[in-house]
Amino acid sequence: MSDLSAIFGLLNADLSVAALGFWLHPAVILLVGAVLLPLVPARLRQVWMVLVPVLTFARILGMSKATFGEVQFLQFTLTFGRVDALSLVFAYIMGLMCILGTLYGLHVKRAVETTAAWIYVAGSLGAIFAGDLITLFLFWEVMALSSVFLIWFRGREESLAAGYRYLLVHMAGGVALLAGIMLHYRATGSMAFVGFDVAHPSTASYLIMVGFLLNAAVPPFHAWLPDAYGEATFNGSVFLCAFTTKTAVYALIRGFAGMEILVVLGVIMALYGVVYAVLENDSRRLLAYHIVSQVGYMVAGVGLGTELAINGACAHAFAHILYKGLLFMGCGSVLFMTGKSKFTELGGLYQKMPWTFLFTLVGGLSISAFPLFSGFVSKSMIVQAGFEDHKLWMAFLLMLASAGTFLHTGLKVPYFIWFGKNHCSKETWERAAEPTWNMMAAMALTAFLCIFIGCYTPYLYQMLPFPVEYHPYTSYHVSETLQILLFTALGFFLLLKKLTPEAKISFDLDWIYRKGGRAFLWLAKKPVQMLDTGVGELYRVAGLIPLMVSARLSAVFDNRVIDGAVDGLASTIRSLGNRLRGAQRGALQENLTMAFGVAAVLVLLFVWMF
């Protein structure tokens, strides 16, 4: 017992570089735990899986507000530990969600899956505590590279393709972020991660914001989210829904609070996600689309930039991580037990999985902002901030989106999975049952927190960056909310036949660049296919001849600049030749398609911005 107390004492002590030359980053605990997990004996593995996230959360609870972990690297000062009210509230909920997500997947025998999840969480915590743009970028990329395995581990062909698309899109976003960071440093000489000039944004600021917006799944950069989260493992999606988009929200708050374009983008997200969620047949894709909608509230709050709006964005991110995690746990339990996630293949499961239904219903009521549930005390802060800032159009459209939320997540998901017409096959029905004890425990704890936050507001409000003077439980607000929810419920049952899910695919904006990429690939391959030795001839004409001319110029003028140009040209030509050969074999078809598509969308965005 004394040894255990000593460990927690170390975790709860902020050891600055000035004091002992060491500061324990909570991400380090997760990274070490992730590396050692596959080496832990099987009989002790579950104990280790509980201990590591608990120690990480204890470390977060024990952190004091200051700047730690400053390291000199070349001419830069890297800051790994900027601990303040904003970073602490995000770290708190992410540490808590790491415990709940790990508990939910405690029975998974593949240790490497938990390893990937912990590295993913460590990347998120590292980005949140980063005080400079270099550290932010490094942890940003750790998140992308580790989280993709939570999609691939499902093992389906669709999961493999979705994972590659996810990785390509996030790498494109990382390139935009890195380019913005370099331009920002060139212009200012500083790598500090502080608020950018939102009144007169530069090209560097726009590039950095694009990197953040891609992770926040802002249209038209959102299609990766339902594509990937719907194909992830049953427990991997619980982690995915909590960290990437909310880390992006944190970064937007830190860098772009008050950027007015974010108000417009946030409202578009809130409505866009609702529309596609109503159309969706797959339960987890529906929840993924609704992440787009709910993050839209947060992005709009960041765009307002007032103290109430920023508090609302932080509070809603906190509440969203819990209730969205609970919803993915509920639908993930159905997938784990039955092997199905589409509404047209489910129905009537209340008889087999009543507790799973109850926990999922709590998540649905929370996301719908029902009184006494967590969404009620967080979402309304952003709407109220819109009214106070005289942006009535924003506030009313967000209220409309809230009605749509209750329509599909509060009503459609529970009804068509647990009630309604039974579309289960004989095999599906026989497999259906309550999930394992650890999955039930994780859902029960998360459901309790959703209700606790909704009933006892000081628990959440005291963590927020600014003093809170907002009171959600006024008679007007409660009556207004209940009227919206009850009329939405009435509309759902009156239009039940129209809202019945159908086994079809809804086209999204990714269709444009995916089809555009295929068209480009066809055009690129056609001339090569027409010539038996097309690649070699093209390489000779477009590559060797210019290369030889450049080499002669270099020999004549003996100029270092020309030498550098020749080296770069040679490297580019070799790369072109390899890619053309790969295209001829068809090996790079998917990569070329996605790369071209993402690049095209980026170009369109910049044309629109400027």
Image (tube, rainbow, N blue to C red):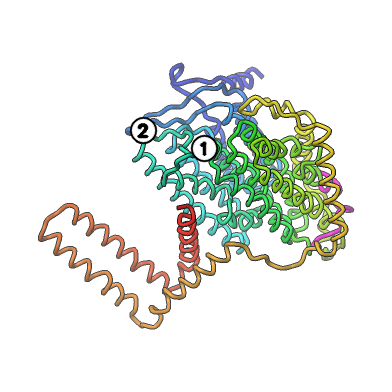
| Type of the residue with mark 1 | Ala
Q: Inspect the magenta stretch and tell me whether residue 355 lies in it.
A: yes
Q: Is residue 399 visible?
A: yes
Q: Residue at 64% across / 48% down in the picture? A: 267
Left or right of 65 in this view: 372: right
The disc at residue 127 is 1
Q: Pointer 1: residues within 10 angstroms few (<14), some, or many (20+)?
A: many
- Residue 346 point in image, percent of width and height: 81, 60
The disc at residue 36 is none
Magenta range is: 345-359
The disc at residue 76 is 2
> Is residue 207 shown above or below 457?
below
**Relative to the observer, which residue lies in front, 15 or 86?**
86
Left or right of 561 in this view: 208: right
- Residue 571 point in image, percent of width and height: 29, 60
Q: Residue at 62% across / 36% down in the picture? A: 94
Q: Pointer 2: residues within 10 angstroms few (<14), some, or many (20+)?
A: few
Q: Inspect the magenta stretch and tell me whether residue 264 lies in it.
A: no
Left or right of 361 in this view: 262: left
> Is residue 551 shown above or below 172?
below
> Is residue 36 shown above or below 16?
below
The Cα–Cα distance between marks 1 and 2, rounded to whole angstroms, is 17 Å
- Residue 432 point in image, percent of width and height: 82, 56
- Residue 361 point in image, percent of width and height: 81, 46
**Relative to the observer, which residue lies in front, 124 or 11?**
124
Question: Which is more N-terminal, label 2 or label 1?
Answer: 2
Left or right of 176 in this view: 340: right
| Type of the residue with mark 2 | Phe
